Amino acid sequence: MRFAVLGLGFMGSTHLKALRRIRGVEVIAVMDQDEQRLSGDLSSIQGNIGGPGERFDFSAMRRYRTIEEVTADPDVEAVDICLPTHLHAPATLAALRNGKHVLVEKPMALDGPSCEEMIAEARRSGRVLMVAQVLRFIPPYRALRDLLRGGELGAVRSAIFRRRCAAPTWGPWEFDASKSGGGVFDLLIHDVDMCLHLFGPPRSVAATGYEDLRQGVDVILAELDYPGIGFVAVTGGWHHVGQYPFSMEYTVVADRGTLEYSSAGGGAVLYRAGGSKEDLPSNGSDWYQAEIEYFVECCRKNVWPELCPPEESAAAVRLTRLMVESRSRAGERLAFTA
């Protein structure tokens, strides 16, 4: 399958590393507006996880500077969109209208109507559209899903999902809420998506927190209302520009055990109600490779990505938007319509 990668920042570099390890996939084109990156020099790229940037050999690839050029290339079968968030929708629509399959980084778009337009275009074109919600492919979160869905732990009584990092420094667009959605939207959409994946849509949400994007601070504590669950909370965000470390974690209490994971504190663990402790799968293949391999499989079969459907990614955008709105309204509880 012939790919084009759009955007050669941190996520574009990360996806390029994964793509070169996938059998039967060839990256034939790249797109960016930065000439140093288009030359293959991504050595200055840094992110909140993963290793340092590196140099790539783009000499045999087609190098484009605009979305219109790369999505019109007739030899490209699928595009991997790693552009700033405000470009996700227009790039996706252009690619679908040119008959390409689309993998687009999260957040899917900046608002619900844009997401719905992307899904409708994918349905019309008969192409595969998938959002790169990588949490669904990370072993500790897959173990959490499998245990809860298997039913052996009984009903869930509480769940907390937390994610935080220093404010990113790889692009000024991140600090422009009209382009990134802000730190809460860009970062915690992972955990909102996981709540939807595990528990379905909540009835409502109430959130408090603080935002000052100029200072690199954007934090939130959101409570999602699920019937039968004591509470489900999503919290975290950006903690200034600097050395504050990235971390992600969860604690889920069920009738017959508690599940816990912290990227900063070790692997995932199940503490059974009877007192025993069990380590859960925490390692595996590269997360990004696993999600792209799944996307490629869906494209080859031309089937909708049921493990990571764009409808749920769109719901995550709407729910995260509602969280931010509730925060701006001093924690007012707002109804969520799936």
Image: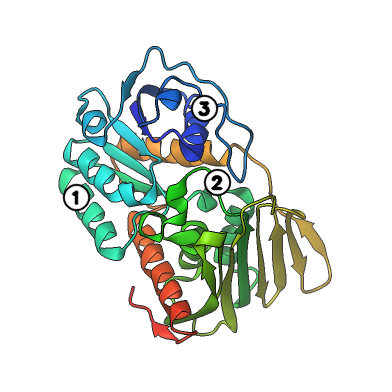
Looking at the image, can residue 188 be seen? no
- C-beta proximity under 8 Å, tags 3 and 2: no
State which tag comes first along the sequence, 1 or 3. 3
What residue is at 47 percent from the left and 57 percent from the top?
186
What residue is at 48 percent from the left and 78 percent from the top?
327
Q: CA distance from mark 1 to mark 3?
A: 33 Å
Q: Which mark is residue 169?
A: 2
Q: Is residue 227 left or right of residue 235?
A: left
Label 1 crowd bin: few (<14), some (14–19), many (20+), radius 10 Å: some
Which of 243 and 87 lies nearest the eye of the viewer? 243
Residue found at the far right of this picture: 275
Q: x, y (%) of residue 26? A: 39, 22
Q: Amino acid at mark 1?
A: Glu
Q: Amino acid at mark 2?
A: Thr
Q: Secondary structure at mark 1?
A: helix
- Seen in the picture, residue 171 relative to 157 is either above or below; the reply is above
Q: Secondary structure at mark 2?
A: loop
Q: Which mark is residue 121?
A: 1
Q: Amino acid at mark 3?
A: Leu
Q: Which mark is residue 42?
A: 3
